[in-house]
Image (cartoon, helix red, strand yellow):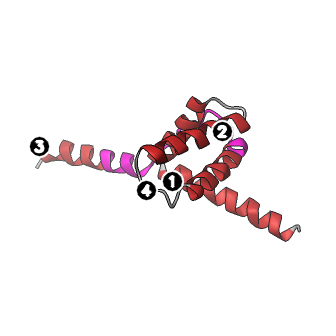
Amino acid sequence: MSRFLPMLLLSCFLFVGCLTQHREPLPIDEDQLEAVLLDVHVAEAAMGQLQGGEKKDSLANLYYDQIAAIHKIDREVLDTCLSILQRNPEQTKEIYEKMAEKMEELKENK
């Protein structure tokens, strides 16, 4: 029994560590990120009907380059933000919830 106790404790710590996700720092502030994400969604919707392949990849690169230019960030920063959000679904959810709240406030103030 005493031989299994350290393994049990280690397993518990690993399990708890997996449950408590950390927020990965983003290279731009969340307000700017929200505006960028809105444009990313517009671009993704515009490409929605295209099938995968070289044409879609080229168009995606063009759109993402334009989004980066519009928001005065490097394309590398945009790609980093998207990668961070892809790896951290809970963080992404929090950002989108804040975006939804802001959109609701805008609707109510009109």
Residues at marks 3 and 2, CA–CA distance in whole angstroms: 59 Å
* 7 is within the stretch colored magenta: no
Quadrant in the picture for the C terminus: bottom right
| Place of residue 52 in the rendered image (x, y in percent of width and height, measured from the top left) | 41, 52
| Place of residue 96 in the rendered image (x, y in percent of width and height, measured from the top left) | 62, 57
Stretch of the chain drawn in magenta: 13-32
Please tell me which residue is depicted at 48% across the width and 48% down the height of the picture. Answer: 56
| Residue type highlighted by circle 3 | Arg
Q: Quadrant of residue 6?
A: top left
| Residue type highlighted by circle 1 | Glu
Residues at marks 3 and 4, CA–CA distance in whole angstroms: 56 Å
Asked if marks 3 and 1 touch (Cβ < 8 Å), the reply is no
Residue carrying label 3: 3
Asked if marks 4 and 2 touch (Cβ < 8 Å), the reply is no
Q: Nearer the viewer, mark 2 or mark 1?
A: 2
- Vertical placement of residue 109 versus 73, above or below: below
Residue carrying label 2: 66
| Place of residue 26 in the rendered image (x, y in percent of width and height, measured from the top left) | 59, 37
Q: Secondary structure at mark 4?
A: loop
Residues at marks 1 and 4, CA–CA distance in whole angstroms: 29 Å
Q: Is residue 106 toward the left or the right of residue 71 in the image?
A: right
Residue carrying label 4: 51
- Vertical placement of residue 109 versus 5, above or below: below
Please tell me which residue is depicted at 82% across the width and 63% down the height of the picture. Answer: 106
Is residue 65 among the parts visible in the rendering? yes
| Residue type highlighted by circle 2 | Gln
Numbered badge on residue 90:
1
Numbered badge on residue 98:
none
Of residues 26 and 2, the one drawn nearer to the viewer in this rendering: 26
Asked if marks 2 and 1 touch (Cβ < 8 Å), the reply is no
Q: How many marks?
A: 4
Q: Nearer the viewer, mark 3 or mark 4?
A: 4
